[in-house]
Each structure stands twice: as structure tokens, then as C-alpha cells.
Image (cartoon, grey):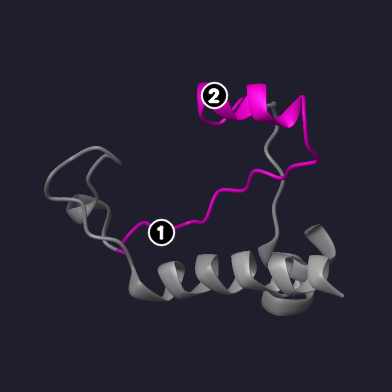
Amino acid sequence: MVSLAKEAFGTENVLFRDRASMGADDFAYFCQEVPATYWIVGAAVEKEEERKSLHNEYLILEEEAMRNGLYLELAGVFELLK
């Protein structure tokens, strides 16, 4: 997935966290059974004062980020189908 992301969005736009994260708590369980990848799509709006937390009813995501996340998901599926 890293190579697909770098190809799609540029190496400079694929970042790694300084510390590990389980993501969703059940995701770590599934990863014990099947190979898996967890990524975070940066989706914050430009203006910091307009940003809301992930579980806020007023959350607004940048639409380009949603397209990018979907693109990466589908690229991974098509790669697996080769």
C-alpha cells in the first residue's frame, strides 16, 4: 500500500507516524488473522478555527481527502486482484 500511495499522491505526501497506533481497537484483532494495512487520510479543513473532532456532528471533511481515501482503497483492491 505504501508504494501505491506514493505513486498516487507523491512520496512527500506519504507520512509515517512517530509512534504505533492500533487504529480501531478491533482492527488489531483482525490483523492477527489476515494481512492488513491501516492508514489515516488527512481530511482536516484548512482553517484551524473551523476544524471539529472526528466524532463531532459539525465535522466537515475536505472532499478531496474522501476521494483520495477511496482511490487508495480501490487501488489496493485492484492490486490484490492482479
Q: Which residues are magenta?
A: 21-46
Where is residue 63, by image quadrant? bottom left
Front one among 60 and 48: 60
Q: Is residue 34 left or right of residue 30?
A: right
**Image vertical order of residue 56 relative to residue 64, above or below:** above
Q: Identify the residue at horizontal 52%, vertical 56% (top origin).
A: 41
Front one among 45 and 31: 31
Q: Identify the residue at horizontal 61%, vertical 25% (top origin).
A: 22
* Residue corresponding to mark 1: 43
**Quadrant of the drawing holding the N terminus:** bottom right
**Image vertical order of residue 22 relative to residue 39, above or below:** above
Q: Amino acid at mark 2?
A: Asp
Front one among 49 and 45: 45
Residue 8 magenta: no
Look at the magenta stretch and give its main secondary structure.
loop
Q: Position of residue 35 (x, y in %)?
A: 81, 40
Q: CA distance from mark 1 to mark 2?
A: 23 Å
Q: Amino acid at mark 1?
A: Ala
Residue 45 magenta: yes
Front one among 42 and 3: 3
Q: Which mark is residue 26?
A: 2
Q: Earlier in the sequence, mark 1 or mark 2?
A: 2
**Quadrant of the drawing holding the C terminus:** bottom right
